[in-house]
Amino acid sequence: MTTKNETFNFTENPLSTNWDAVQANGLKGTATGAIAVDSSGFAVSSWKESNFNFDDDQSSQITVDSLTAYDMPGVAIRYASTGGGVGYVGYYDNGDSRFYIKRYSAGAAAATLRQTNSFTMANGDTLKLSIVGTTLQAFKNGVQIGADLVVTGADIVTGGQPGIMYRFANSNVTLITAWEGVDASGGGAAFNPVAVWMP
């Protein structure tokens, strides 16, 4: 198992030393955290393959701060720029207070795989999305959100890298202050939760 970490306490527009902009113009570092480069829309930056090429079994986790209404910080897994953007994203909508898991294809949401009941997030909380085989799991502060999600058929995506994502309809103020990506390398048990929370 291999772990990669990043704290966004530096200025870089867009993120490029360890990251590739795989959706829109990606995210940027602001010295206090990461936000979208552009002033609207949907952006993804994934961990640069030349720095470390993740296996398909992977997870992506962020820490959030300065939460602002309608900003949507999140994570990406198995995400690639192929065909305009392909992979899975998981994000917290700070407008309706729900967590969404979606499959993206050609740079647009092709399927909403899960929408949770509403719950609250606070500054310093973490969100994580992991996948082992065809099983997706989402976590808040290390506790699984809802049941396992098994994808089938057209919803199966392979390849790609873990990363960070950002959508917003209001302010582009919410910060992603830290990221952790894990390559399970066959060690899927590392993703098993100690508790399951059903919002």
Image: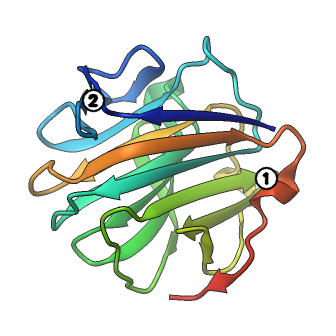
**How many residues crowd mark 1 within 10 Å: few (<14), some (14–19), many (20+)?**
many
Quadrant assignment for the N terminus: top right
Q: Residue at x 35, y 73 (%)?
A: 121
Q: Residue furthest right?
A: 186
Q: Is residue 176 left or right of residue 174?
A: right
The quarter of the displayed image where residue 41 is located: top left
Location of residue 37 by image quarter: top left
- Could you tell which of marks 2 and 1 lies nearer the N-terminus? 2
Q: Secondary structure at mark 2?
A: strand
- The residue at the point 26 percent across, 49 percent down is 175
Query: Does residue 15 sit above or below 115 in this rendering?
Result: above
Amino acid at pointer 1: Val
For residue 198, what is the image quadrant? bottom right
Q: Residue 29 bears which disc, if any?
A: 2
Number of labels in the image equals: 2
CB atoms of marks 2 and 1 within 8 Å: no
Going by the numbered disc 2, the residue's amino acid type is Gly
Q: x, y percentage for residue 115?
A: 46, 75
- State the scheme by which the image is colored: rainbow
Q: Residues within 10 Å of mark 2 (few under 14, many from 20)?
A: many
The image shows residue 17, relative to residue 190, as above or below, that is: above
The residue depicted at 42 percent of the width and 54 percent of the height is: 63
Q: Tell me the SS state at disc 1.
A: strand
Of tags 2 and 1, the one toward the viewer is 2
Q: Which residue is mark 1?
A: 132
- Going 63% across and 31% down the picture, which residue do you hit? 160
Which numbered dot is residue 76? none
Q: CA distance from mark 2 to mark 1?
A: 30 Å
Rendered location of residue 138, percent (x, y): 59, 66
Residue 133 appears left or right of 22: right
In this rendered view, identify the residue nearer to me: 183 or 95: 183
